[in-house]
Image: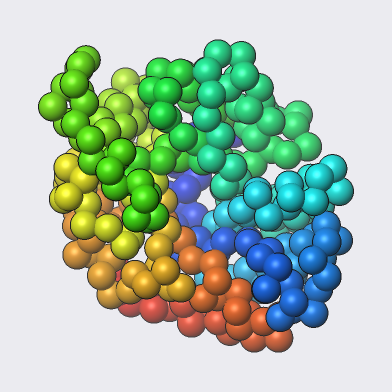
Amino acid sequence: MTRPFGERLRAAMAQRGQLCVGIDPHPFLLDEWNEPATAEGARSFGLQVVEAVGSAGTVGVVKPQVAFFERYGSAGFRALEDVLDAARDARLIVIADAKRGDIGTTMDAYASTWLDADSPLRADAVTIAAYQGLGAASGTLRLARETGNGVFVLAATSNSEAKTTQTAVIAHGPNHGMTVAAGIVRDVRDDNTASGETDLGSVGVVLGATLDLGDFGVETADLTTTPILAPGFGAQGALYGDIRRLYGDASGSVLVAVSRSVLMAGPDRIVTSIRNHAAEVAECLA
């Protein structure tokens, strides 16, 4: 039986550090890599990133941005399947950055797409949105645990437009008086606790590194056993030297997500770039 996602993630971070490399075939990056802005270009780009991460030996987690593949339709999904296959063959943990969110059987179908062992798009974890309430994703969380996979729930995101919604105060229910972001964090933490996961849970949260989490009502001291996916480093402006200040006692649970600042090194220098970024993250967390 596959080990729980949290256990596998903890082992990967212990062995290869806490950097997570995004696989984001932006059109401008495809151009810089001398690849066409097509499904085949995205496929070639993704496979080269996976190979570079494997060669670097200092990163255990990759995060393909699904949107940059699905823009090419069925051919884009086939390209993504090849990239996911290659990442699994390289023994990397793969987070499908799909940000799906719905209710009932529709949400269950999304879960099967990204987490079911028989799906051609299976990953080790998927990002989801919980605007409809975390309870609407109960089937997703259940399937994740049944398959030894994980979920990352958007809580406080790095885009400025989200602040109004995510800092709004909840008027009803068990999280009454908390911000929306803090309520999601609490629900995720409680779900991990209820599952009996005592080291690192299989359900994590997305907490942007460009934010003052205190403004969002989020207490990171409560998240030492909750995986945190932290976008915003590198091209978006957050600095590795601020990880401990931003996440405090929970810093050991943070996946430091970076994409453009690594990928812009190009195919000839990306291995060196990955190693340099990973070394800087390790130094800041030492």
Can residue 38 be seen at all in this image of the molecule? yes
Count the labels in the image.
0
From the viewer's perspective, is 247 left or right of 104? left
Figure quadrant of residue 183: top left
Q: Residue at x 66, y 65 (%)?
A: 26
Q: Which image quarter is the C terminus in?
A: bottom left
Q: Position of residue 278 (x, y in %)?
A: 46, 73
Q: Residue at x 55, y 57 (%)?
A: 61
Q: Residue at x 67, y 73 (%)?
A: 29
Can residue 44 be seen at all in this image of the molecule? no
From the viewer's perspective, is 125 left or right of 13? right
Please name whichever residue, 51 or 197, is drawn nearer the observer in this view of the structure.
Answer: 51
Q: Residue at x 35, y 46 (%)?
A: 162
Image: 239 above or below 15: below
Figure quadrant of residue 233: bottom left
Q: How is the image coloured?
A: rainbow
Q: Position of residue 174 (x, y in %)?
A: 20, 17
